């Protein structure tokens, strides 16, 4: 993305955002409430068109991609997905395969595989509307993974996740981020919005920190997780130490 900007009236919600994401990279976007994270997500997912700048995907401007083409290589998990009809969980995940014509047998196999990696097999025959918030979040992750899980090489694929851990308990937060980490590099690039700086520091290759609609830092977790920057952006005094188990920065407040 180059010089990306978005305004509502005279108010700039996002300005001058530059970032080039390498194939297979995992980039976390962090920032306080109102920083512009969801605005950036809406621009990348195509929900809103930028007022300035460009978004290129696999070298071509996003607006040149047809919706069908995009749906096969880019999947989007918004903060909340409003499904009010009581679909079975397995059918919700199967919806991820709709853009493909890979055949029923292969779609079934892919759904089985993503249900296993997302730890939702035991929910397969439950109604989606009966699930807890955290269970729904894992089912939605399985759906978006199913969408880009094809074995056919369609080139680089992009997974956009907006706060995918917000409803998860600690164990599932770590599992989900590890899973996201594991799918990176298998021709999947990930951009994930997270509130927890320590999840970003542990699992992302690079972190973009947004503040008042601008990117105030973009770099490795070691470069971005600085106490001075965190105090300036989040207004919280912290210490940043080396994680005793993983060696990544650990933000202690
Ligand atoms: N349609 C809109 N009209 C006017 N202002 C808006 C609109 N949408 C968002 N904003 C404002 O833009 C700013 C950025 O919003 P955004 O949702 O991108 O923040 P965020 O970083 O995702 O915040 P949070 O962590 O609370 O989800 C906020 O101040 C918000 O009130």
Image: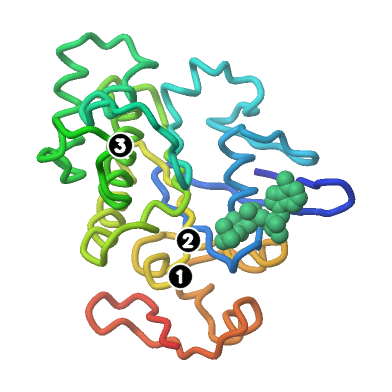
Identify the residue position indicated by label 3 in the image.
Answer: 129
Identify the residue position indicated by label 2 in the image.
Answer: 206
Residue 15: x percent and y percent? 76, 54
Rounded to the nearest angstrom, the CA distance separating label 1 from label 2 is 6 Å
Rounded to the nearest angstrom, the CA distance separating label 3 from label 2 is 36 Å
Mark whose residue sits in front, 1 or 3: 3
In this rendered view, identify the residue nearer to me: 93 or 249: 93
Looking at the figure, which quarter contains the N terminus? top right
CA neighbours of label 3 inside 10 A, class few (<14), some (14 to 19), many (20+):
some
Query: Which circle marks residue 175 in the picture?
Result: none
Q: Earlier in the sequence, mark 1 or mark 3?
A: 3
Tell me: residue 92, above or below residue 102.
Answer: below
Mark 1 near mark 2, Cβ–Cβ under 8 Å?
A: yes
- In this rendering, would 111 be left or right of 36? left
Query: Which circle marks residue 221 in the picture?
Result: 1
Inspect this view and state whether residue 235 appears.
Answer: yes
Residue 173: x percent and y percent? 29, 60
Tell me: residue 65, above or below residue 246.
Answer: above
Mark 3, ligand 1, within 8 Å: the answer is: no
């Amino acid at each position: 993305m180059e010089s990306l900007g978005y305004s509502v009236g005279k108010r700039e919600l996002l300005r001058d955002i530059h970032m080039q994401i390498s194939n297979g990279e995992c980039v976390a976007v962090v920032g306080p409430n109102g920083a512009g994270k969801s605005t950036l997500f809406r621009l990348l997912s195509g929900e809103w068109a930028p007022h300035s700048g460009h978004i290129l995907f696999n070298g071509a401007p996003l607006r040149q991609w047809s919706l069908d083409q995009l749906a096969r290589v880019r999947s989007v998990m918004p903060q909340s997905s409003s499904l009010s009809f009581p679909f079975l969980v397995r059918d919700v995940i199967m919806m991820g395969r709709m853009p493909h014509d890979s055949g029923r047998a292969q779609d079934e196999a892919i759904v089985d595989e993503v249900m296993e990696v997302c730890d939702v097999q035991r929910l397969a025959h439950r109604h989606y509307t009966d699930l807890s918030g955290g269970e729904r979040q894992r089912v939605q992750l399985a759906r978006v993974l199913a969408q880009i899980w094809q074995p056919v090489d369609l080139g680089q694929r992009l997974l956009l996740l907006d706060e995918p851990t917000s409803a998860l308990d600690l164990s599932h937060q770590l599992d989900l981020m590890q899973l996201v980490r594991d799918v990176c590099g298998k021709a999947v690039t990930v951009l994930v919005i997270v509130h927890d700086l320590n999840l970003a520091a542990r699992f992302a290759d690079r972190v973009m920190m947004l503040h008042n609609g601008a990117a105030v830092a973009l770099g490795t977790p070691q470069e971005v997780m600085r106490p001075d920057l965190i105090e300036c952006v989040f207004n919280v005094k912290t210490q940043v130490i080396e994680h005793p188990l993983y060696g990544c920065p650990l933000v202690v407040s």
